[in-house]
Amino acid sequence: MADTIYDVAILGSGPAGYTAAIRGGQLGLKVALIESDSVLGGTCLHVGCIPTKALLFNAEIWDHLKHAAEYGIAGIGTPQLDWAAVQKRKTAIVNKHTEGLEFLMKKNKVTVVSGFARLTGLAKDGIHTVDLESATGEHSELQAKNLILATGSFARTLFGQKPDDRILTNIEILSLAAPPKSLIVIGAGAVGVEFSSIFRSFGSEVTIVEFLPRAVPVEDEEISKELTRLFKKRGIDVNTSCTVTKIEKTESGVKIAWTTAAGKTVEKEAEKVLVAVGRGPRTTGIGIEKTKVELDRGFVKVDEAQQTAEPGIYAIGDIVAGLPQLAHVGAMSGIVAVSKIAGRAYRPVRRDRIPGCTYTDPQVGSAGLTEAQAREKGYAVKVGKFPFAGNSKATIVDSHDGFVKIVADAKYGEILGVHIIGPQATELIAEAIAVMELEGTVDELMFTIHAHPTLSEAMLDAYAAVKGMAINA
Ligand SMILES: Cc1cc2nc3c(=O)[nH]c(=O)nc-3n(C[C@H](O)[C@H](O)[C@H](O)COP(=O)(O)OP(=O)(O)OC[C@H]3O[C@@H](n4cnc5c(N)ncnc54)[C@H](O)[C@@H]3O)c2cc1C
């Protein structure tokens, strides 16, 4: 390895790193992918996107089974939840895709290197040297013309508490021996509300405590309001504008205290507490200070090609300043970085062209500007809203809560934002992104034929609603 000089060495094999590695291989670059964990795939594959969505699918099936008789399925009796089988299925999905990644690395001639990587300083004659520490503490060196930092993120905790079997982060909660009887979730961002949704379906008594005034605070205000309403309908206790002041273990669980906006102190005990208060960048202890790479509160500052202030060093994924921490953003930022390294054409990642998906029941899918953001930017805004209650497919799939909201520019009818809450919102949002990429307008979309009966017809009705002409409401 010491004699090889790679075109690019990638530090971290999460969705950002592995995508960059594959595209690098496709572009003919000599790529090394360095991973400190024993498996490829990072947070997303092992303790993030994939296992949570596997559990959410189980939760959905379980919820449907509760209404089996209504769907004409008799003879089921009382369904029993086999938690061990649920976990087994989740693990099998993760393993299948881990193997898939190993195959893709071979297919694309990517050299996978095991070890914890650290930068050693400035490049010499255009060559960067990385220190590699093996699991047993031995050190070696790897050289590359370009480096891509893709070290990802970690779950932040509160009051310096370390996670354990009762105070949980996304890692511990994914391997519980049984669904808890009661669960307090601190934080109502995507991670917090997804776990709330999962465990509520499996029968846990769920309480959410959020510091900001609304759940899913990055979403359009009407989406937050609707999700809160529907969560409450599902029996989830949602508390916003609340500051957690204490987390302490009791004999059988965990007690937390919080202060409400009105200054009242509330205490509640639960079997488990999930701390989902955001994710910090893994940028310490990797030698960044030995380079000119600039940080903003620990996140790496990059230009349009994902290049840092140090020539030849790029950063992608969750560690990048100013981009949402999402797997697909990481993956695309990786494609941009290797395209630039290979001297190929690329399109920078645009902050206003990123789908945001929250896989709760009901799902949330959004893209572009919220209504408030569009107004703040000075647009004359026109809004079209269509409820799933008016969509026949939504009734067929027994899921007619929620709506599609279109935020359009009044002057030209350009679609500025799309906000969906309801069935398959995370799939429907793909249309919105394509439309926005192509700068579609309300006039064009009102005449775009959507198949019947589909959930996507709710999009057509919502575009038409911008002009007050939805057909089905
Ligand atoms: C519960 C949960 C659910 C989520 N669900 C979704 C979802 O549905 N959709 C979505 O888009 N996003 C989701 N996310 C976010 C998503 O997981 C992250 O955005 C994504 O994993 C970031 O990818 P990354 O490659 O930047 O980093 P990571 O996936 O964190 O990978 C970084 C990798 O780098 C390795 N590494 C770190 N330091 C070093 C080093 N010095 N040397 C070598 N290797 C190193 C780590 O071991 C790790 O494997 C979820 C996150 C969580 C926690």
Image (tube, rainbow, N blue to C red):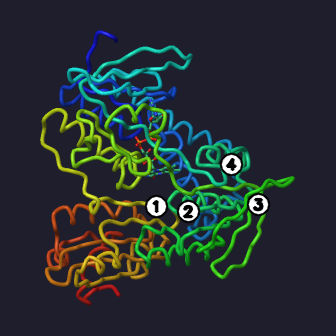
For the residue marked with disc 1, what is the amino acid?
Answer: Thr
Report how far apart the C-alphas of labels 4 and 3 lie in the structure. Answer: 17 Å
Q: Kindly indicate the quadrant of the structure image that contains residue 109.
A: top left
Q: Earlier in the sequence, mark 1 or mark 2?
A: 2
> In the image, residue 45 lies at what x, y percent?
47, 40
Q: Earlier in the sequence, mark 2 or mark 4?
A: 4
Judge depth for marks 2 and 4 and give the one in front. 4
Q: Which residue is mark 3?
A: 270
What secondary structure is marked by label 3?
strand
Mark 3 surroundings: few (<14), some (14-19) or many (≥20) residues within 10 A: many
Report how far apart the C-alphas of labels 1 and 2 lie in the structure. Answer: 8 Å
Judge depth for marks 4 and 3 and give the one in front. 4
Q: Is residue 338 left or right of residue 135?
A: left
Query: CB under 8 Å between callouts 1 and 2?
Result: yes
Mark 1 surroundings: few (<14), some (14-19) or many (≥20) residues within 10 A: some
Q: Earlier in the sequence, mark 1 or mark 3?
A: 3
User: Residue at point 13% right, 35% down?
Assistant: 343
